[in-house]
Amino acid sequence: MFRFLETDRLVLRAFTTADDDRLFALDNDPEVMRFLNGGRPTSREAIETRVLPRLLHDYPCWGTRGYWAAQEKATGTFLGWFEFRPLEEHSPAVVELGYRLNRASWGHGYATEGSRALIRKGFTDLEVDRVTANTMAVNVRSRRVMEKAGLSFLRHFTGDWPEAIEGSEHGEVEYELTRAQWEQR
């Protein structure tokens, strides 16, 4: 198992095809998926043909993944995943930060801890210049994690939702943190 990053309480590791059951359970919790697809279930076929291949993708600029399975360090319990992927395949300059954690791990600071560690690694080891993150404007918990991780509100925008979900009428928000801002802290 390739360990990409460790914190005091987390291990971020590369996904494998053996994670399909964990991803199926995660993506079938309506509360976990509330701000992503309105809480609709994800089929096993979608996990195998769309979700898992995306999580297994290696980015040429790093020669490694952009999505990481999150496990509790002490127990090995699967908590969910973190995204820290380049927006362009061949350039690490701008990355998108994201996270999807199971409900049992909410409220314990894991999202903030993992996000801060990824940001630190990005700016110190991976030649990242800018970290960006997006969420629905009404997703207060995710916005708070972004702020605690050091990102600042950049803009409000309206995206094209294939199917409107509750809260999408309020649009989305983008947060960012640049290397220069991070170095000043």
Image: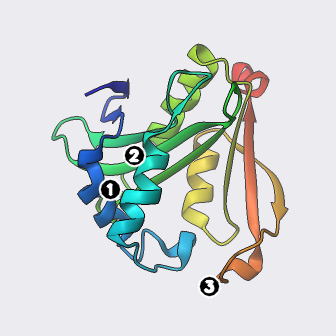
Vertical position of residue 185 compared to residue 78: above or below = above
Q: Which quadrant does the C terminus fall into?
A: top right
Give the residue displayed 74% in from the left and 21% down from the top: 184
Residue that badge 1 annotates: 105
Judging from the image, what secondary structure is the residue with disc 2 in? helix
Residue 19: image location, x then y, percent: 27, 49
Residue 128 falls in which quadrant of the image?
Answer: top right
Tag 2: amino acid: Tyr
Dot 1: within a 10 Å radius of its alpha carbon, few (fewer than 14), some, or many (20 or more) residues? some
Residue that badge 2 annotates: 110
Residue 41: image location, x then y, percent: 40, 77
Judging from the image, what secondary structure is the residue with disc 1 in? helix
Give the residue displayed 15% in from the left and 41% down from the top: 75
The residue sitting at the top extreme is: 125
Discs 1, 2 touching: Cβ within 8 Å: yes
Left or right of 112, for residue 132: right
Discs 2, 3 touching: Cβ within 8 Å: no
Residue that badge 3 annotates: 166
